């Protein structure tokens, strides 16, 4: 049958329409639902319009130009190419339809191919189909217009308030991220001084508001609430236009501001000139992250394995991809060369403290610690972490029902809290050396917490997770304060701004929802946390106390107290440290083990910033199911224990081992099944994969 296709003008319209159904309109919708994605990058109106134009017609235009060029050689070939593009453009829509059913990768590919063939066939055979696509050009036009009109953009500048400062004092504000108070505490209700010595020292020197709670479950609303002292309303985004009255505009005319924002854009450029990447680099980063977010949106889970996790962040998704390298040197360089934004940001923050700073200086930093991705040890060394093994069914959302997987995620979180503790020690030392510690007002807090309940969303507040998400650390070291104090009453993070204002003797020129923490305070009847959808969850102080007690007891049962216990799991902990040879392991028949990032173990440098403390991989042995007790040997000694778990039909393992288990040079890794009894354990060595020995 001879194919008769419309003019190139109509072909372009048809491709734009199909592209809109599959790609451009879903991306616009995704950005409309998450405007913070653009706001935190400082995207301008012009950049957003260029993005929208390229997203709407860029790829279809390139496709039509390719068709036209091919048709100069062969008209038939150009027609075939058009139909091929049409089938390709409809693929994301087909995948999205299959996502809720997830029939598996093979069936999904066949179904998508069949769907593409059906669409192309109907396009060739039926004039009504072509007419439908012609009329559908209205969709991308309307979607484009609404997007560029409604999407919020950065308002760069605003004048600060003219206020009278009656007491001069340097102000230092550190906002940590995804940090529940319970992570710091022992069953006695005190901060673990061995595991987290610098937070414990801070509690001895400052006022620790042990009953502090956040007011929002989500960083782009929780951080503006801290900075403005006001509850964020639904629809507001973390920019200056929606939050013109904040800490930076309060002090901008009176103080020198040294500000490091992460997910907000609240400091006017007249006070906070920003170092911005080139337009090309910003666009490259934006396109890369949009691509990953879009793939998460449309791909069935069986096809999304290996995608970098979104992990409740707004940029840098590709940096969390699985490291693949054939050579150990390349592997270490790949990890060490990644953009360590947290490390770099904190170093820049510390470097700005100086002996000659005027008293009227504000230092502010929002650090995404101990927020995911969990890749840091307390020493500051970083370990590669493959995606898809953090125990979530959807990255950044619902936890797995497997308690073992969730418990290891909790373990990795607590280790990263250790790194945050290390940074707080560096901050105090820097303030002391700069002779600012005694006279400064120092605030250390967090925007929200996180829960580790199997089968539940770790970031959505509920009655069950309220204490974990609502309770956050809050330490305030007042100017001249020499002795610590503990306040157990429930206070809120929106109280921080009014407190800073009162310490500096500033009369706030606008209304706030918080109250100063200076002076006598009364217990509130209940604490409230606002969800992303605008609803709220309340809990009484007694309910919060009971929830924290349950979490602390569970944490202590899992990991004990002190630092070394964090590397001991409840799966056969008595084996850790024993020589492998003394246990006389047997060899399994027909079992294969595949280590991920295997090249890292061939040439380790113990003193480097990168250490492969997370040993992960898969087991190819049908009779091994989820929950099998396992052990890992490092250089002939048991260094960690774990349980197998299932992800995407694969039996996986994941061991956390201390950096002291490794030695310089090549390291031997062995994986064992743990059989027998606690008093008489038996090891069964699982063989290497077909690539050879580990």
Image: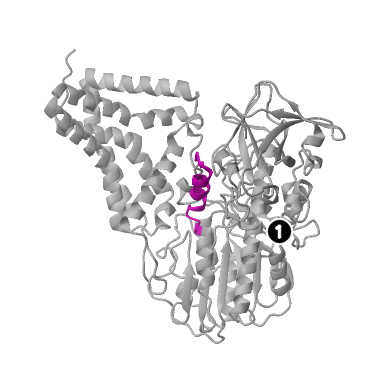
Element under label 1? helix
- Residue 125 in magenta? no
Label 1: which residue?
Answer: 184
Q: What quarter of the picture does the N terminus occupy?
A: top left
Q: Is residue 24 left or right of residue 483?
A: left
The answer to whether 332 is drawn above or below residue 73 in the figure is below
Place of residue 203 in the rendered image (x, y in percent of width and height, measured from the top left): 71, 69
Near-viewer residue (650 or 137): 650
The answer to whether 209 is drawn above or below residue 285 in the figure is below
Q: What quarter of the picture does the C terminus occupy?
A: top right
Which of the 4 quarters of the picture holds residue 120? Answer: top left
Magenta region, residue range: 322-341
Place of residue 592 in the rendered image (x, y in percent of width and height, measured from the top left): 63, 26
Instruction: Name the residue furthest bottom.
Output: 166
- Residue 336 in magenta? yes
Which of the 4 quarters of the picture holds residue 281? Answer: bottom left
Q: Is residue 242 left or right of residue 132?
A: right
Instruction: Name the residue furthest right.
Output: 679
Near-viewer residue (192 or 327): 327
Instruction: Name the residue furthest left.
Output: 72
Q: Is residue 254 left or right of residue 474?
A: left
Q: Residue at x 63, y 78 (%)?
A: 432
Q: Is residue 236 left or right of residue 619?
A: left
Q: Residue at x 50, y 60 (%)?
A: 232
């Amino acid at each position: 049958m001879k194919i008769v296709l419309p003019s190139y003008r109509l072909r372009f319209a048809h491709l734009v329409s199909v592209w809109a159904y599959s790609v451009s309109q879903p991306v616009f919708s995704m950005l409309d639902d998450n405007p913070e994605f653009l706001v935190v990058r400082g995207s301008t109106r012009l950049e957003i319009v260029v993005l929208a134009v390229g997203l709407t017609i860029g790829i279809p235009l390139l496709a039509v130009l390719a068709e036209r060029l091919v048709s100069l050689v062969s008209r038939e070939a150009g027609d075939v190419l058009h139909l091929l593009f049409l089938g390709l453009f409809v693929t994301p829509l087909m995948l999205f339809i299959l996502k809720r059913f997830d029939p598996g990768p093979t069936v999904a590919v066949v179904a998508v191919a069949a769907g593409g063939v059906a669409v192309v066939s109907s396009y060739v055979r039926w004039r009504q189909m072509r007419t439908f696509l012609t009329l559908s050009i209205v969709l991308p036009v309307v979607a484009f217009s609404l997007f560029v009109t409604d999407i919020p953009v950065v308002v760069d500048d605003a004048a600060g308030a003219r206020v009278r400062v009656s007491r001069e004092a340097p102000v230092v504000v550190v906002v940590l991220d995804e940090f529940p108070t319970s992570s710091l505490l022992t069953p006695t209700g005190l901060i673990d001084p061995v595991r987290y010595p610098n937070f414990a020292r801070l509690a001895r020197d400052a006022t620790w508001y042990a009953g502090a709670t956040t007011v929002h479950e989500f960083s782009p609303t929780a951080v503006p609430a801290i900075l403005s002292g006001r509850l964020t309303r639904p629809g507001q985004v973390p920019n200056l236009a929606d939050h013109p009255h904040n800490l930076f505009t309060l002090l901008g005319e009176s103080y020198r501001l040294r500000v490091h924002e992460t997910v907000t854009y609240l400091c006017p450029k007249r006070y906070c000139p920003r170092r911005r990447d080139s337009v090309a680099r910003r666009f490259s980063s934006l396109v890369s992250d949009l691509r990953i977010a879009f793939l998460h949106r449309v791909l069935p889970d069986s096809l999304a394995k290996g995608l970098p996790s979104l992990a409740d962040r707004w940029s840098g998704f590709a940096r969390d991809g699985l490291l693949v390298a054939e050579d150990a040197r390349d592997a270490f360089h790949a990890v060490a060369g990644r953009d360590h934004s947290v490390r770099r940001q904190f170093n820049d923050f510390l470097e700005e403290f100086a002996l000659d700073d005027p008293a009227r200086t504000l230092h502010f930093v929002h650090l995404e610690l101990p927020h995911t991705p969990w890749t840091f040890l307390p020493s500051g060394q970083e370990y590669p972490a493959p995606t898809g093994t953090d125990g979530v069914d959807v990255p950044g959302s619902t936890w797995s029902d497997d308690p073992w997987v969730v418990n290891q995620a909790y373990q990795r979180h607590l280790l990263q809290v250790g790194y945050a503790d290390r940074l707080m020690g560096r901050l105090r030392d820097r303030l002391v050396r700069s002779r600012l510690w005694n006279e400064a007002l120092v605030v250390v807090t967090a925007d929200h917490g996180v829960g580790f309940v199997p089968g539940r969303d770790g970031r959505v507040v509920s009655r069950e997770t309220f204490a974990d998400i609502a309770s956050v650390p809050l330490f305030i070291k007042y100017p001249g304060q020499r002795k610590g104090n503990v306040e157990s009453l429930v206070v809120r993070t929106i109280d921080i701004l009014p407190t800073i204002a009162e310490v500096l003797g500033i009369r706030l020129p606008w209304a706030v929802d918080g109250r100063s923490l200076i002076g006598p305070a009364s217990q509130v009847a209940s604490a409230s946390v606002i969800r992303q959808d605008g609803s709220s969850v309340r809990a009484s102080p007694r309910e919060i106390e009971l929830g924290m007690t349950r979490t602390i007891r569970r944490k202590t049962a899992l990991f004990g107290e002190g630092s070394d216990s964090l590397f001991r799991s409840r799966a056969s902990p008595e084996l850790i440290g024993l020589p492998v040879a003394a246990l006389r392991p047997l060899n399994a028949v027909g079992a294969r083990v595949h280590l991920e990032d295997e090249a890292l173990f061939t040439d380790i440098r113990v003193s480097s910033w990168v250490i492969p403390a997370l040993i992960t991989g898969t087991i190819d042995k049908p009779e091994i199911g989820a929950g099998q007790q396992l052990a890992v040997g490092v250089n002939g000694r048991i260094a960690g224990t774990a349980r197998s778990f299932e992800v995407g039909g694969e039996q996986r393992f994941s061991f956390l081992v201390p950096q002291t288990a490794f030695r310089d040079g090549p390291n031997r890794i062995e994986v064992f099944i743990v059989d027998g009894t606690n008093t008489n354990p038996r090891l069964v060595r699982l063989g290497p994969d077909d690539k050879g020995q580990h």
